[in-house]
Image (cartoon, grey):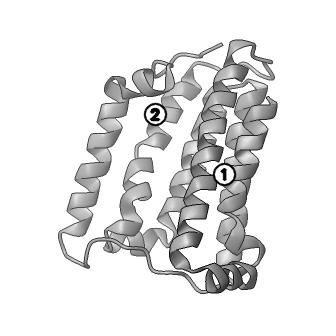
Amino acid sequence: MRILIIGLVLFLGVHSASIVSVEWRDGVVARIGKGPWQGLYSLVAVAGFVLIVYGYGLARQDPVILYVPPGWLRNLTLILMLPVFVLFLAPYFPGRIKTVARHPMLLATKLWALSHLLSNGAFADVVLFGSFIAWAGMDRVSMKGREQRELPGAPPSKWNDLILLTAGLVIYAVFIGGAHLRLIGVPIGTPWG
């Protein structure tokens, strides 16, 4: 569990630089430069992600079960996951979906984490998915008081929403069709414990 927590601290910590202090983040970027900042940021984020994956895998080997969700919640998880990939990609395809969702990547994170909390009841699940829900909520609240940086992406187009829906639903289908099992080691709709 310790490795999972260290990974979460690194990954979510580096993603919280602007939540904690935009001035600090901008000051560091001004001192060391945008390229070195992005390199350091990426290095810490990747290290954190690797530790999350490894630590979560270790925790799955000897799970501490907090609750056993009813089977029908797995169906709800599949439904809640349906818009996740669309929303996750939306910041990069300016269109109506991005405009309506306002902060689509954070909404995707919340839906992903909540849906997985509903269908997984081990302590490691609560730590992992609960951390992401808490982080996404804090980031969303902090965005009300800070200017948003532009993300690179496709130019605005009337076709972006169609491209986005198609790409997001194809990725969803790939995950349902077996990628979740190959990447995560858990078949869709079955508990890992």
In the rendered view, tell whether residue 92 sits above or below residue 80: below
Q: Is residue 88 left or right of residue 32?
A: left
Pointer 2 or 1: first along the chain:
1
Give 2 or 35, whichever is nearer the viewer.
35
Is 111 drawn above or below residue 144 in the view shown? above
Q: Position of residue 143 (x, y in %)?
A: 64, 77
Q: Position of residue 30 (x, y in %)?
A: 63, 86
Question: Which residue is rendered at x = 56% and y = 71% of the image?
Answer: 36
Residue placed most toward the observer, 112 or 49: 49
Q: Residue at x 73, y 35 (%)?
A: 4
Tell me the mark number nearer the camera, choosing from 2 and 1: 1
The amino acid at mark 2 is Leu
Few, some or many residues within 10 Å of mark 2 (<14, 14–19, 20+): some
Structural distance between the alpha carbons of marks 2 and 1: 26 Å
Residue 74 location in percent, x, y? 54, 26
Q: Do the CB atoms of the residues marked 2 and 1 lie less than 8 Å apart?
A: no
Q: How far across and how far down the image is residue 71, in percent?
A: 58, 18
Q: Name which residue type carries label 1.
A: Phe
Number of other residues with Cα within 10 Å of mark 1, as a class: few under 14, some 14 to 19, many 20 or more: many
Q: Secondary structure at mark 2?
A: helix
Side (left or right) of 174 relative to 85: left
Kindly identify which numbered label has been placed on residue 78.
Answer: 2
Q: Quadrant of residue 122?
A: top right
Side of 169 where 158 appears, left or right? left
Asked if residue 38 can be seen in this view, the reply is yes
Q: Residue at x 40, y 70 (%)?
A: 98
Give the quarter of the figure containing the N terminus: top right
Corner quadrant of residue 15: bottom right
List the residue tagged with mark 1: 11
Residue at (50, 26) in percent of width and height: 184
